[in-house]
Amino acid sequence: MTRSAASPRPAPLPREARSVTGRVAQAEMRAANMGLLLRHLRAHGGRSRAQLAHETGLSKATTSSLIAALADRGLVREGEVVRGGSVGRPGQTVTLDGSTVTAVGVELSVDYIAVTAVTLSGTVVRESVTPLDVAHLGINTVLDRTATTLVRTLTSLRESGVDVVGITVAPPGIIDYDTGTLRFAPNLGWRSVPLVAELTGRLGPGTPPIRLENDAKLAALAEYDHLARDGVRDLLYLSGEVGVGAGIIADGRLVRGWSGFSGEVGHLPLDPSMSPCNCGRRGCWELVVGLAAFLALAADEGDPLRDPGRALEDRLLTLAERAAAEDPRTLVALATITERLAEGLGILVDVLNPRMIVLGGYYAYFGDQVLPPLAEALAARRMDEGSATLLATSESGFMSTARGGALLALGDVFDDPTLVAAGD
Ligand SMILES: [Zn+2]
């Protein structure tokens, strides 16, 4: 219950207990209601105090006091004067601000590090992708490089007067959330790496809190952030990198599974050749639909297109140009991948009944070639016309995961805006 109006009155406590518990409860209620206002502004855009009070059920006096507290933290600002309907005084529009509050998302992929910083209002203020052959460098080298990239980003944000409230790191593997450890990354061969402790140690004192989250789950959050405004509540995001994983949003909530293993769909047994996979199983789907499979089909060994030292985006743009120019080898490679994609997605659609499937990673570069035949294949399997699934490619491509990481960390401020210190 976050609304102060119309809450049921509990039985009275003894006097002393009442004063302490009362103050704590009041502060918690206030923080929760500030969060309610902030989330309302994010979802519905700028509006007057009167409108905010009306729509959230908070009293006008409470709303005014909370807006003042939010403005004091730089989280909202009041702007142009609007008339609130036919009666009442004109009011100022309150809008989400938070231009000095950011969070950072980092994706540690098999062959690059992507870093982004996003403000509370969703503006991307820093973004970088560094090619890095993570799979072949030692863990310490990778951690050192990640820390260096992070320090550069944090320093430049602080120098421009921006606070960083949190950092989310997405490693390509299975996470132990309680200890901040990467338990197993099949495509790196890493086991039990205490990533949070290692990075916090390298970044030194004053480091914002670091958390870990799975890459595909974060990308799903980033896509859901804008799709939810179009009414999508059930989303399947498929990451297309060396590893293939799914981020699942069901009825508006991210599905993690009891130990965070949900969405490891790249290891479904769908490769008819039953080749061995890095995960220890045989016949995994990502062996036939992952980035390595596509590059092997599209270019010969020794071709610069298969060189992990070169920027992946440049290599994919070259292949996208070839596809657009109807280069037969590229088109055959994409048709093969699409056929295999349809087999796995057909199963996932039956299990999850998503309203929308978003293809990320390298798939996002080949929407014109992949989406139409994929839609056709899924439609051919459909048992009922009413259950059609929409298909799209990700608009933020390889940045989805890092953006989702920043959004996840910013979620803390939307839950409790008092995490940001009031006016200095
Ligand atoms: Zn596998």
Image (cartoon, grey):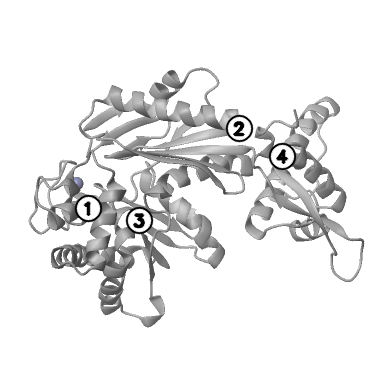
Q: Which residue is mark 1?
A: 290
Q: Earlier in the sequence, mark 1 or mark 3?
A: 1
Q: Earlier in the sequence, mark 2 or mark 3?
A: 2
The label on residue 160 is 2
> Looking at mark 1, is its residue's CB closer than 8 Å to ligand 1?
no
Q: Earlier in the sequence, mark 4 or mark 1?
A: 4
Do tag 2 and tag 3 residues touch (Cβ < 8 Å)? no
> In x, y percent, where is residue 324?
26, 67
Q: Name the secondary structure under disc 1.
A: loop
Q: What amino acid type should be assigned to the residue bearing mark 1?
A: Gly
Q: Say above or below: 97 vs 195.
A: below
Q: CA distance from mark 3 to mark 4?
A: 34 Å
Q: CA distance from mark 2 to mark 3?
A: 32 Å
Q: Which residue is mark 4?
A: 74
> Looking at mark 4, is its residue's CB closer than 8 Å to ligand 1?
no
Q: Earlier in the sequence, mark 2 or mark 4?
A: 4
Q: Residue at x 68, y 54 (%)?
A: 41
Q: CA distance from mark 4 to mark 1?
A: 43 Å
Q: Is residue 260 left or right of residue 420?
A: left
Q: Which is closer to the viewer, label 2 or label 3? A: 2
> Which one is in front, 173 or 424?
424
Q: Say above or below: 135 vs 262.
A: above
Q: Which residue is mark 3?
A: 360
Q: What amino acid type should be assigned to the residue bearing mark 3?
A: Gly
